Amino acid sequence: MPWEGWFMKVLQLHVDYVEYEPIKPESSIYEEAERRRYRVEDALLLLTSIEEGDGERLAEKVISDALRFAEKLGAKRLVIYPYAHLSSRLASPGHALKMLKLMEEEARKHEVEVWRAPFGWNKRLVVAVKGHPLAEQFRSYGVEGQLTVSRQEEEVPQALKMEEKLKSYWYIMNTDGELIPVEEFDFRGHENLEAFTRYEIAKQRAVLEQPPHVQLMRRLEIADYEPASDPGNMRWPAKGRLIKSLLEQFITQKVIEYGGVEVETPIMYDMGHPALERYLNRFPARQYIIQSDQKKFFLRFAACFGQFLLAKDMQLSYRHLPLWLYELTRYSFRREKSGELAGLRRLRAFTMPDTHAFCRDLEQAKSEMKRRLRMSMEVLEAVGLTRDDLEMAIRFTKKFYEENRDFTRELAQIFGKPVLVEMWEEQFFYFILKWELNFVDSQRKAAALSTDQIDVENAKQYGITYVDADGRKKYPIILHCSPSGAVERVIYAMLEKAYMVKERGGKPSLPLWLSPTQVRIIPVAQRHYEDCLRIMEEMERNEIRVDLDDRDESMGRKILDAETEWIPYVVVYGDKEKETGMLSVRVREEDSQKTMSLQELINQIKSKTRGKPFKPLPLPKLLSKRPSFH
RNA sequence: GCCCCGGUAGCUCAGCCGGCAGAGCGGCGGCCUCGUAAGCCGCAGGCCGCGGGUUCAAAGCCCGCCCGGGGCUCCA
């Protein structure tokens, strides 16, 4: 029955705008086209795959269908766009082009502005899909021109039930605590929030290439793929390991300052253990499983189990609460689907700080949560991510909101900018409120960093109790917070931000306390080498990471290499410095050259890294002795 | 997981309608001893991702797999 497979596939998108730009001819048959950027606003975009056997009368059907829809939506323009990716049984280019032209011809008979993207080109495509429920429609047409599948009309009772339960309402909450429906919010001046909102709701995706941080993480010798491992398990050469280790140390220090109690728990758990079974079954098939003898173990995907099992055996009284248990998990594992992995943004093995607060009641939980939000913002600020780089989302049940409006407003106020709100009709997850701080990257994709949740189920589930003032055993409320999110993801955000700085004409850099080399010394000639060694030793005594470019290379080359490595301070030392006793310093942050004494330089660095952890440079200090990791 | 694109020297990539494996950078050797973003000359370096097939002949064509990227989906 060959006709069963003959469908034209059309993805109808109601867009705020679509931009396309022919880059180079790709197919054996291609149309003449100007290599410029085309932009069409407020249009119905038809991403169209012509399949083998699609008959000519389909063109008419597809267009009349689209026009009916465009009218309903109020879209004034129609864009016909050849889009091969919807089909694995494409028609020949010749036939496809003929069909597309027929569609165009058909559309021109009607009252609508018609655009058609050139066929046979590799094109850059950017689309911004509108955020309403009918903005995205997938259609598939059979030989008779009959609409055979449409997502809107499909009946899936089981899925609908779930959807009902998960029904979300989206708002923006401003810092006065007002909830404004997303469609009514004026996003001017809040472009990142708009991008984040679209990412969350409307699934807007810009089509670009590989994320910029991937090239940076490899070139800067921070992280790299390890083909001999499972995808999403990275390797970390010396500089990356140093950066990661400093971040881990800093986050841990911060949580302990806030009263965290650091513990360590196993990375694998028995799948048959009764307390774990339910939690596990709720989120199936995302675990690494390890078979050992007769038992099956799963690798932890957070520190929850370890800490809950540990807390269950503790003797807790209300006097001890709130109690924060803390662990930096190296690693946590989630077997994400292969198509979801991307550089350092999403991994299968990642390092995550996780701190649970056991609280006496909701009031205590709310007050702890506010402290934890402040802590999280301090952590992210230390790596150079300020509230300008972040967007907050708060998600809660309708019931929680109605009973705790002031609290949700306070969270938005601490963050200090309007936040995205998702409100659920009913409680579906184990938590009743959750917030996250999200980073919007150079591809306008969002990634969650810090997060905290109010968990009202797991204490009971794990048998965690405390004795209250009245002598009775009670279940605490548990908060689940990762102050930074995965450490790898923090590095991803830092690198993406650096890339965006560079795109705007600035100099990309890492925070001084995280720079593997903080100061590079370059001797002008070999006779200055001894003096340079002495300067280096003096800096090392002051806990500054310093190295010396003693290679047989020109000055220009050495400066270039130092710049390429994003080194914050470069000291050039020659006869002039020997005479005057002053140093010539290139300061990356200011893009300037300055003359200062050794002591001034040391003082400046010390004051800028105050309160941050220090580790010595885990590489040979003489560049002539330092191997490259590529 | 599904669809699409890619994988050639350490890196970035050219070669691809079948006919001797290439460039730049990096590495190594030599010259230059140098003042703020690439000094000069030379040399070495390849399972053309892996496996199978077609062919007189495969980096190239076909099939399968692995790895990476994009999209879908997902993100407790």
Image: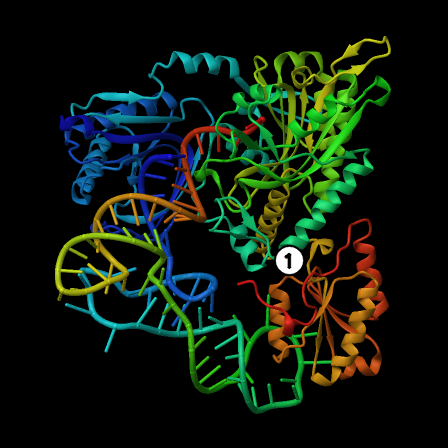
- Indicate left or right for A514 with A261 as reference: left
Quarter of the figure that contains the N terminus of chain A: top left
Q: How crowded is mark 1: few (under 14 residues within 10 Å), some or many (20 or more)?
A: many
- Indicate left or right for A416 with A219 as reference: right
Between residue A328 and residue A228, name the one nearer to us. Answer: A228
- Indicate left or right for A541 with A453 as reference: right
**What's the chain of the residue with tag 1?**
A
Q: Where is residue A27 in the image (x, y as percent from the top left)?
A: 24, 50
Q: In this view, does A485 lie above or below A458?
A: below
Tell me the SS state at disc 1.
helix
The colour style of the image is: rainbow
Q: Which residue is drawn at 77% across and 20% down?
A: A359
Between residue A269 and residue B35, name the one nearer to us. Answer: A269
Q: Quadrant of residue A387?
A: top right
Q: Is residue A396 above or below residue A603?
A: above
Q: Residue at x 21, y 30 (%)?
A: A109
Q: Where is residue A41 in the image (x, y as percent from the top left)?
A: 41, 36
Q: Name the residue under label 1.
A: A239
Q: Where is residue A240 in the image (x, y as percent from the top left)?
A: 63, 54
Q: Where is residue A259 in the image (x, y as percent from the top left)?
A: 82, 33
Between residue A540 and residue A416, name the one nearer to us. Answer: A540
Q: Is residue B14 above or below residue B28?
A: above
- In the rendered structure, which amino acid carries the disc numbered 1? Lys
Q: Residue at x 76, y 21 (%)?
A: A365
Q: Report the number of discs.
A: 1
Q: In which quarter of the image is residue B63?
A: top left
